[in-house]
Amino acid sequence: MKAALSIINWASSLISGLITSTLQLIYSVIQYILTRPEVNIPFLNPIIDFLNKVPVINIIVHLILWRPIFDLLFVPGLISVTIALIYIIWFERKLTAKVQWRIGPLEVSRSIGGFLQPFADLFRYTFQEFVVPRQVDRGYFIHAPAIVFILSILPVFFIPIGPQETNGVVNGIYGVYTGYDVLIAIALVTLFNIGIILIGWASNDRFTYIGTVREALLYTGYEVVLILSVVSILLIYGTADPFEIVKWQVTHLPGAVVNPLAFLAFLIATLMATSRFPFEIPEADTEIVLGPYTEYSGVVYGLVMTMSYEKLYVLSMLMVLLFLNGWAGPYIPPLGALSYALWFGIKTYIVMMAMVFTRSVYGRYRPDQALRMSWSSLLGLVIASLLLSLLIKLF
């Protein structure tokens, strides 16, 4: 009896100790969140001050405005990526329809030009049945799109869209800062293509094989050009630190003016990397259905369909950072940290809209034409940009 009582006492003391430790940990976390510096957005201050007077709600507000969470969720995080994807898909459809004398998406939200059509598509893909064909490699077929989707999102968090500080106050918005963010982002972009090849291989279908081989061929054509164009402009800046890159451009000239050859090479390589016309070779819907993604359906098809747009968004951000002065623009005091994000976002959207415009005016190259151009004209262009950078650096 005494042994049983001692065991009960020991267990109760252990449980009470665990509860006390857990409560202390929760209290410490709450205090940490409440005392950390928040993202500075002056025009929201009256609303934030009001919400901070409400118990529990004030903790949520501080948590949302805590820089790591704010960067992850809003800018440059997941919500910004989602808005960019929805907008650019709608814009590409409407622009192509206008140029080609068609109507474009108009069934959903006719009064605002069918802008809600991408949301309707997302809703449809989410609740559509996901069919796994018998012949596929089931494990890779299911998991590969999720892996590639994550790889396509990761570079966003290594591309800052605001300065680290202004007049001693931390105002900028950035995910992960290492000092080598540009190189890390480019490395992650190149990993994306390996995942696409894995998707096509896992589908075990003749059409996906053809699309996958085309993707691999195009990959060999543009990656060298893309990397060398980045290297040539970094030679001028003398650093891969994004904050120093923007500072250099603001002090001197935009990268697109200093080395227009590197800018042009990066632009064409981006079109190839994102399968924009005239390089829509892997998908080529009139020839091979949808390339590596032919066998996918439902919510997974929604994921794979947006991957090229995510890549377009990432490379457009890199283009703005490397060649178009980054977040430089007139400071708007009421927006605070979002002022820099606004200018960076405007430039990024303009670049993306220019990219998708090519769908309306260009035909599609054959794979051999694209590769011939890559390994002759484009390679010569990027080598010339390297020589130009060396001359600028020397003299």
Image: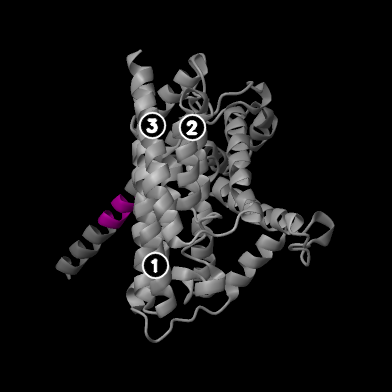
Eyeballing the image, is 358 above or below 67?
below
Q: Which residues are magenta?
A: 13-19
Total numbered labels: 3
3 relative position to 237: left or right: left
Q: Is mark 3 in CB contact (under 8 Å) with mark 2?
A: no
Query: Which element carries disc 1, helix, strand or loop?
Result: helix
- Report helix, strand or loop for mark 2: helix
Residue 309, visible in the rendered structure:
yes
| Disc nearer the start of the sequence (3/2) | 2
Locate residue 335 relative to residue 185 in the image: left or right. Answer: right
Q: Earlier in the sequence, mark 2 or mark 1?
A: 1
The C terminus: image quadrant: top left
Secondary structure at numbered mark 3: helix
| Residue nearest the observer in this picture, 176 or 350 | 350
Residue 313's spot in the image, x, y percent? 53, 46
Q: Is residue 14 magenta?
A: yes
> Identity of the amino acid at label 2?
Leu
User: Which residue in the structure is indicated by mark 3?
Assistant: 384
- Identity, as a three-letter code, of the amino acid under mark 1: Thr
Give coordinates of residue 264: x percent, y percent: 49, 37
The residue lying at 35 percent from left, 35 percent from top is 383
Q: Look at 43% across and 84% down and name the residue there.
A: 133
Q: Quadrant of the N terminus?
A: bottom left
Is 300 located above or below residue 113 in the figure? below
Secondary structure that dominates the magenta span:
helix
Name the residue carrying label 2. 321
Q: Residue at x 52, y 75 (%)?
A: 297
> Does residue 332 show up magenta in the picture?
no
Q: Position of residue 54 (x, y in %)?
A: 63, 39
Residue 143 lies in quadrant:
bottom left
Q: Which residue is mark 1?
A: 212
Marker disc for residue 176: none
